[in-house]
Image (cartoon, rainbow, N blue to C red):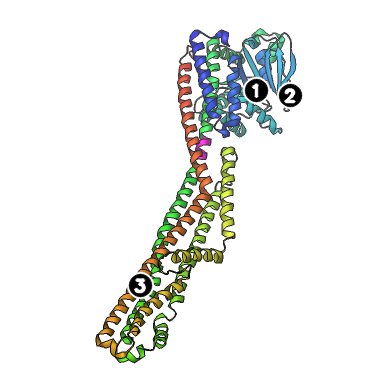
Amino acid sequence: MLALLTDGEQALLRDERAALGRLQVALARVAAAGPDTDALAQSIARLDELFLLVVVGEFNSGKSTFINALVGQRVLEEGATPTTRRVQLLTHGSSIAHTPAGDALDRVTAPAEMLRAIHVVDTPGTNAIFREHEAITTDFVPRADVILFVTSADRPFTETERAFLGGIREWGKKIVVVVNKADILETAADLEAVQTFVRTSAAALLGTEPPVFALSARPALRAKLAGDDLAVAAPPFAAFEAFLAAELDPRERVRLKLLNPIGVGRHVIRRGLAAVDGDLGVLADDVLAIQDIDGQLSVYREDMGREFRHRLASVDNVLHEFERRGVLFFDDTLRLGRIVDLLNTSRIKAEFARDVIQDMPKRIERQVHDVIDWMVASDLRQWQGVMERIRTRREAHAHRLAGAIDPRFDADRARLLDTVGRAAERTVETYDLAKEGEAMAESVRLAVAGTALAEVGAIGLGAAVTAVATTTFADVTGILAAGTLAAIGLFVIPVRRARAKASLRRKLEAMREQLVGALTSQFDAEIEKSIVRVRDAVAPYTRFVAAERDRLEASRAALRQADDELAGLQRRVEALPGSPGSARG
């Protein structure tokens, strides 16, 4: 191959090798393209080898006979049953010999002149009972520089042939169609009808009309073996050989050889981009899931804040009721008509506890515990929502076609979703509402005890409220220190009453501010802790999605750049001087 290149072609070859090398680096980041990269590597390696003419077709279409006629010798086994089980690579040699050359590959040598410049490959027939034959043929197709597609005149262009040809179309190969066994057709009209059918069918499938030749390989082989020059020179086999010689002159072979890895590379790029786009499609849904979780957390914070303010109003109502009863008590008790009663401290204290304090400490504690129970239940529901969202993502794409997604990406994603999902499930399954409520209540109690509500140590909320009432009552009963009824006077009681009510309002307001402040602070801390716990649990999944999206977008950009580069090289190769009538598939 290299000896045939001009200086311009040598420069183009160097550019092509460099571009294909960069493509291989880009493809290394796309695991789903792995099988195709082997085909690309083989096509690059074969740039230095002779031209490869690969013959494909259904079993019993006469491929082996056709190749024997082409080289003018009976070098391949012929028969009505599937005879070719391995790829047969025909090369030039001093004698006919068959040598194993690797998995499913035999090297066949023959002293045929055309094999000095061109290697011919016979592939196992498709649509045979041995399904591995078709796989072997399909795997070998990317190595071809030109494909001769052989069909039979008695069953031209079957559905299975259409499917096979459609599968190899994307490799960008030059395809020539041969309708073998034309001698079984009785009239020229029948022959023309078959050729027209094959030509239009192939054009519709390939998007371009390939050369189509109707011929009979067996009579041509017999004529060559018998040395019948007249029969050999007779059309249509001779016409096909003339076409092949003209189409595959040295310059055209160079051009097709250079185009082969470019076509393979662009096919692999398309497959790689499809895999990347598939992964990005999955990630797009994952991004939406993460955004949905973030949105849920934001809504959770807003809803909880709104509901919390509403629930605080219940606590505030109890305090307002306490204040109202206290004011009424002082108005009713601290008056001149009850001076004698005021001298009985125990009695007044009992009335204050009965009429003012009542069950207010318990009601305060009950209201606060209701808030705590609500927060704990809301936290559990939030975890249940996250668990359900992750479960949905785990189930998404579970039944997609194998190979549609990069297996490495899919495995990592599935592992992380499983880990996050199980963590959420464990949280929900082990969520102890009572324990969580007790822990939160203790946090609130300690927060309240740390304020100026009481100068004693860690006391409960009810005890704090009682302390406010007791100190207020102590202020009131200070009027008894005067000692005698006469010393109190008519003007002392109104002053004491006003002072008692003001003191009660002042202390209750301070208590309200400190209690609400402590509850609000604790609420904010608990909400933030809940949100942080969810985000920490989802963080590995979030980081994976972000990193994979960056990697895939970089891979997509690299593949698109590689495709642009190969497209430019393809235009340069196609502009090389060659056979004027050459048509590329």
Instruction: Out of 567 and 482, give the one closest to the viewer.
Output: 482
Amino acid identity at mark 1: Lys
**What residue sits right under mark 1 in the picture?**
181
Residue 432 drawn above or below residue 94? below
- Identified at 50% across, 35% down, the residue is 551
- The residue that label 3 is drawn on is 507
Task: Judge the density around disc 3: few (<14), some (14-19), many (≥20) Cα neighbours within 10 Å.
Answer: some
Q: Which residue is mark 2?
A: 79
Q: CA distance from mark 2 to mark 1?
A: 14 Å
Kindly identify the residue that appears in the image at 51 percent across and 50 percent down. Answer: 536
Q: Are marks 2 and 3 in contact (CB under 8 Å)?
A: no
In this rendering, the answer to whether 373 lies above or below 232 is: below
Q: Is residue 123 left or right of residue 445?
A: right
Q: Which residue is drawn at the image coordinates 39% and 89% (left, top)? A: 344
286 in magenta? no
The relative height of residue 411 versus residue 511 in the rendered view (above or below) is above
Screen quadrant of the N terminus = top right
Q: Which numbered mark, 2 or 3, is in the foreground of this view?
A: 3
- Residues in magenta, as a range: 274-280
In the figure, is residue 343 to the left or right of 90? left
Disc number for residue 226: none
* Res. 157 visible in picture: no
Looking at the picture, how far across and down is residue 302, in whole percent? 40, 58
Tell me which secondary structure the magenta stretch mostly adopts.
helix
The amino acid type of the residue labelled 2 equals Gly
Q: CA distance from mark 1 to mark 3?
A: 111 Å
Label 2 and label 3: CA atoms lie apart by 110 Å
**What residue is shown at x 55% (from left), y 17% (from top)?**
257
Q: Going from the N terminus, do you reach mark 1 or mark 3 first?
A: 1
